[in-house]
Amino acid sequence: DFKKFNPKSIMVDYPDEFIRKMRLTGLISLRGAGRFIDINRNEQTKVDYALATYSDYKKYTTEESYFEYMSAVDENLISFVAKPVSVGERDAFLAKWVGIYPWNRIKDEMLNLAKERLTKDDVLKYLSNPVRLEFLVSLAIKSKFPNVRVVSNYPYDDEGLPTSTAGGVGDKGDIECFEDVKGILVEVTMSEGRMQTMMEVWPISRHLSQFQKGTKDSMCYFVAPSIFKDSVMQINYVKEKENLSILPKTIEEFLTHVENNSVLYSTV
């Protein structure tokens, strides 16, 4: 019975969920301040393949045959490589979005994440919390320190929005910043508690060690909604044993730092 369906679910919730799922594939971009969806041209080869291969939808007569089809892995979809985005293009994308989101808006959205509040923004609502945090931290740095070169290592769509988190590919950190001759690595996470301790500090130390090979005068910010005490103990151990400078900061502490300092680099 159609009356059993909530109209809001049909017209708002289901379309939003579809868009979120499609964003995970990286195949679509958001246009018009989140009002429209379009093909992500950085993934055009994959899109063309998907349309050519899957547009003719086969009907299945049994559940078994359908699940067999769904369980098959199409290696071609995995093998396609997205169009690379140069450092110059990344910088231009950040400048574009800093022009769209002023500082107070960036700050408010980061505080939403810190306090586990939902966003009402028509673009940001389609980014999962970890992806949104990486994006907003990148914007915050570029907004407050326009002369700092900010290299965000998350994958981009053709509008400059992240399609997922950076993920530590190639032992690179989330966000690499260059302030004169100094390097600042920024690692962000939404994880808290024991999960944070298990998942974050050791990879961060590895990323910072790799980062220092190219920029010797380097440090790292570790940004999360809260910093678990065991994570602090791990960070202190890394500093003592490997002489790596990792500064843990909550989202709110990081906002205070970038808002009240003239330089990004810090050792305290």
Image (cartoon, grey):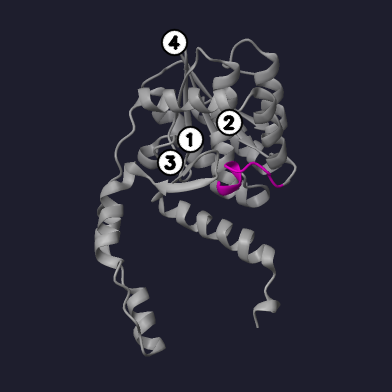
Q: CA distance from mark 4 to mark 3?
A: 23 Å
**Count of numbered badges drawn on the protein:** 4
Q: Is residue 193 above or below residue 204?
A: below
Q: Is residue 123 inside the magenta stretch?
A: yes
The disc placed on residue 174 is 1
Q: CA distance from mark 1 to mark 4?
A: 20 Å
The disc placed on residue 137 is 2
Between disc 1 and disc 4, the foreground one is 1
Task: Indicate the secondary structure of the residue bearing disc 4.
Answer: loop
Asked if disc 1 and disc 2 are in contact, CB closer than 8 Å, the reply is yes
Q: Position of residue 198 (x, y in %)?
A: 57, 49
Q: Is residue 234 inside the magenta stretch?
A: no
Between disc 3 and disc 2, the foreground one is 2
Task: Indicate the secondary structure of the residue bearing disc 1.
Answer: loop
Q: Nearer the viewer, residue 225 or 132?
A: 132
Q: Position of residue 190 (x, y in %)?
A: 62, 45
Residue type highlighted by circle 3: Gly
Residue bounds of the magenta highlight: 118-127
Q: Residue tagged by mark 3?
A: 168
Label 2 vs 4, first from the N-terminus: 2
Residue type highlighted by circle 2: Val
Q: Is residue 240 visible?
A: no
Q: Quadrant of residue 42?
A: top left
Q: Residue at x 44, y 38 (%)?
A: 154
